Amino acid sequence: MKDITLITSSLKSRWLNSALSVLLTAFGVTLAVIILQFGHHIHNRMSNDGKGIDIVVGAKGSPLQLILSSVYHIDIPTGNIAYKDAKKWMKHPKVKTAIPLALGDNWKGYRIVGTTPDYMTHYNADISKGRHWNKSFEVVIGADIPLGLGKEISGAHGLSQGGHIHENEHYTVVGRLSKTGSVLDRLILTSLDSVLEIHGLEAVESHDLDHEETPHEGHDHTARHKEEKHEDHEEHEDHHNHGGHDDHEDHDGDKHEDHKDDDHKGHDHEQHEEAGEPEITALLLTTRSPIANMNLPRIINRDTALQAANPALEMARLTSMLGLGAKTFSALSALLITIAALNIFAGLAGSLENRMGDLAVLRAIGYSQKRIFKIIVTEGMVIVIIGLILGLIFGMYGFMTLTNILNPLAASSAKLQMTNEIIWIIISVTLAGFLASALPAIRASRVNIAKQLTRAN
């Protein structure tokens, strides 16, 4: 009789116990895989997205929310801050670099971020295709954005899909970034003025020109001057070519045109007045020294209406909170695997009492102790391997499902990765199954042939 036949018959005879062992092993492995994938993703995102950012300045609110929304782009911002207030800290002597961010719109869930080229430089991002933006409403897209060069898109209000679309303004894709493995891969970058203008705010460039005519004002003034000059010329020609009643009609018409022109001027002036002071969402700062990294947040939070948060500190707090939950689930996973191993041990040990006679017969017809040991161990390992395979499948599928269901995971481009920790799970579960099977197998291989055969008779 072949060994595989003996193993199959044994497993069928105690299928309920075997199925329970498989399920316990599978559930334990599933939890372990999901926890490790989640922890690996969080660690990578924290290290890649937050590198080199010492302080984040934004509106008052939750400091963790400020960090998650501005550094990792997986939460809603705490609000906006006046650009003039942020500019003071951008030029602070203890600040090495300052990167302003203006948020508020998205395209199909991908955030449109108004910023400066320093943002790309910070993450060592290179242009793989196209070029940088040169004017408003030109965008450079991250490596994960499904768009081609020259495409025109319209932003939607809000940071997730479903907001009001700005149909009157279109962004043009002029460049694509190379893959960086950072938050830039899933962002659409443009100038600050693009985001400010589309939300009815004054452009940063014009706001920085003190005691000078802004580009918008100069453009409107020139256009109005040309329009008035053209209308005066038409009025002179009409007066020269017509007389009497026609002149009266033209005069009335000119009054009407002047009235329309005044309305147009008033409308332009009203629009200019409605444009508010420029605002940004957050300011990413890199300080010149560790002391400045500690002191500046305290000064900003104490003396201004702004909020300053330390990404390293806030993420350490988040990690500690997540770590507590991760340790709990890890303990549960280990417990399930241990119970599965004990159940395998109990199943094999319990079945030996009824199989001793059969094993004695096998020994009598020539089966060696080593062969008997191998048969019993193989029974336990079959259960472990089936449970391990199912657990890996369930764990990977479960993590991919969570990345589609949970917005923070989807927004951070969480992906399944084969890590060393998964290899250790496979080794640990296999070893636990072998130990659980080995003890009953040793006892079975040492069966007393004469005693068992005498008892059988």
Image: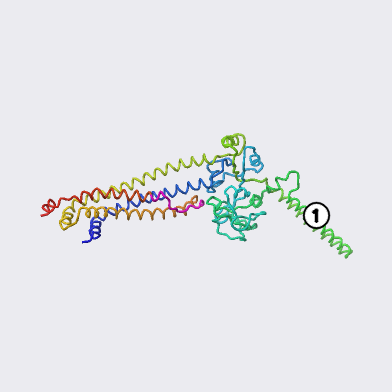
Q: Is residue 263 above or below residue 97?
A: below
Residue 412 lies in the magenta stretch: yes
- Crowd band around label 1 with a 10 angstrom C-alpha radius: few (<14), some (14–19), many (20+): few
- From the top left corner, tell me how far across and down residue 116 is, in percent: 63, 49
Q: Is residue 61 left or right of residue 238?
A: left
Kind of residue indicated by mark 1: His
- From the top left corner, tell me how far across and down residue 252 is, in percent: 83, 59
Image quadrant in which you'd find residue 243: bottom right
| Label 1 secondary element | helix
- From the top left corner, tell me how far across and down residue 362 is, in percent: 17, 57
Q: Is residue 290 left or right of residue 363?
A: right
Q: Which residue is mark 1?
A: 225
Q: Residue at x 47, y 49 (%)?
A: 41
Q: Nearer the viewer, residue 168 or 250?
A: 168
Q: Is residue 138 left or right of residue 268?
A: left
- From the top left corner, tell me how far across and down residue 151 is, in percent: 61, 61
Q: Nearer the viewer, residue 279 or 130?
A: 130
Colour mapping used in the image: rainbow
Magenta-drawn segment: 411-423
Most common secondary structure along the magenta stretch? loop
